[in-house]
Amino acid sequence: MRDDHRVGEALRARLPLRLELVPDWEDVLARAGVSRDGAGAATNGGRSRPDRRARSVRRRPRLSRRLLLAATLVLALLLSAPAWSGVGYEWVVHLVSGEPPKPIKEQLQRLDQGGPVGMGEHPLIDKTGKVYERQTSRGPVSIWLTPTKSGGYCANLVTPQPGRRSGPSSGGCFPAQLRRPIEVSASGMGTDFSAVYLSGRVTAKITRLAVRYVNGGSEQVPIQDGFFVAAVDPVRTLELTDHPHELVGYDANGHVVDRESLDDLFRFGSFGSDRPPVADITRERKAETVPLRGGSAALYLSPSRLGGSCARVNAGDTAWSWSCADPARLPAALRLQLTRVPDRSAAGFAILVHGVARTGAEVVFRYADGARAVVPLFEQNFLVVLPHERWQAGRRLIEIDARTPAGVQLRVPIAHGGDAFYTGGADRAPQHAVVQITNPPDLPIVAKVETRGEHGQKIVFFVKRQTATHWYQVLIVDGKPIAGEDLQWFPNPDGSPGNAIGFEGIPVLSPDGTSDLSLLVGNLRGTARSARVLYGDGSSQPLELTRPTAAIGGGITGFFVYEVTQSRRNRKPMRFDALDAGGRVVGRTKIPLEVRS
């Protein structure tokens, strides 16, 4: 028999109970302020569908969401909301035991900083507890749950991290109410075969959960108190590889309660159509052309300022893909993408396979009938159109290998058990990113920077006061607003002011690539009164600063706009230093390679 009194005391210690506790588990959760099919881990801030083109995470005073891609949208964390379920009181034991990792506490402490007034989550950090923990094929995973004053919950998924111990990989806040019987999100999505984790929550009726793959395989996913985490084999994560197809939830009698499709989580066809800022398109050349019915597709290569090359796949008048890589430094032996582009065949589309292999590796296609083909490479990049005769069951592409003389370095299984990829028409054409910039009129300007770019552009950066506690910053180039956002500065978790100097990278791309701008826009705070940039050749240069004409929150004392011109790029800018009135360094910020390139 369970000790209901002891459970009640544990709950009272962690969550505010509204009514007296009763032995029934549904009432235990409900009267603890928790819906039985309500709260759980999330990775998307409450979005029910993944946003594959969301902006990257803000990092101020480090790099902001516009690092490198001001004109493009970046593949985002795919977030959603998990839930309560399970039997017994194990959830109580997990919640009242264990100390959350320090990075989770720090994230929670920063959660509401800089947010709009009245829209904060107000997490109850001291009530954070662990609700899920298990070993997976890739290492230990856990979910930590935090109630909020608003009545919802915030959750953080902790997974193994490359080259170091486990750490938070995704997190978000959400209402308690479960919207579907199975709610799932994915973290770690990408095209370099990085680890992917499916996490979420299920309704109370679901006692067993399985993930099914497109080629028919399946795995059981353990449920703990209504939460689940599944580690996906990295080579299964691309669209035409053997990716997870659906989650199936069963009740205690083995009946299917719900099926949740996962196909949309693994589609990358329309991502990356905008030119990366590091691509030098003034030196672009055509490397390969493949025939299509009524046209052709082409692979274009241009040097990347980070090393290696940038590849553009074009069909018709559409750039279907842009990617940049240094083959010598690929994190996996192969990067690939499969795209369905329109043509005049009976199916209405052609299937393109394109990507890049690590230096020294060859790419081999293997088919279901035993045939194999070595793919031609151009600076380790490739573009192949899959012949229509290879669309038929029994003759389809089943795997792609990256081989070296030492053997197979990476083997990617390709989905061939169903017809979904070979029917249904072409992929939706990629759309250029639309960036809407708000420039609030009739607001007092409290700081303004005016300068000229390397190619003669007129650059204006100013900060406006919105309210007594909020400011807005705008960057304008040749009269056109390029970037606009709320001015924010996140203090350190311990309450100290944070770094004395911070910046964000904002590239401004010209149509032909001949007059691109690479701007670093930043500010000083606290005791900092001046700043300098240090170069890899040992030299340094003072930054030109503009002082605010009125006090600005966070103790900001100056603003700057620094352009990474070609001459400065040759000197390799390494970091910014903030100096006090006596010339002492009171803060420094490293300039990452991708920004100074």
Image (cartoon, rainbow, N blue to C red):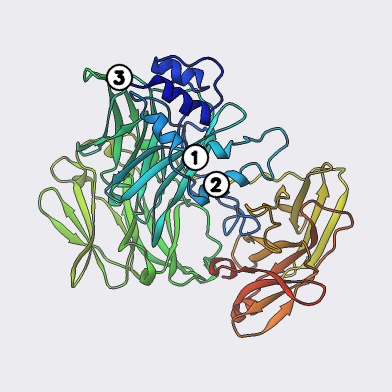
In front here: 142 or 51?
142
* First reached walking from the N terminus: tag 2 or tag 1: 1
In front of the other: 582 or 428: 582
- The residue sitting at 52% across, 30% down in the picture is 13
Residue occupying the far left of the picture: 370
- Residue 205 in the image: state x and y as whole percent: 33, 19
Secondary structure found at label 1 = loop
Tell me how far mark 3 sits from mark 1, CA to CA: 46 Å
Q: Which amino acid type is marked by label 1?
A: Asp
The residue wearing badge 1 is 51
| Quarter of the figure with residue 531 | bottom right
* 341 left or right of 560 in image: left
Question: Which element is circle 3 on?
Answer: loop
Q: Quadrant of residue 573?
A: bottom right
Where is residue 90 drawn, in percent x and y?
36, 30
Spatial distance from mark 2 to mark 1, Cα to Cα? Answer: 26 Å
Contact? badges 2 and 3 (CB < 8 Å): no
Q: Name the residue under label 2.
A: 105
Residue depicted at 53% across the width and 67% down the height? 281
Closer to viewer: mark 2 or mark 1: 2
Label 2 – label 3 distance at C-alpha: 36 Å
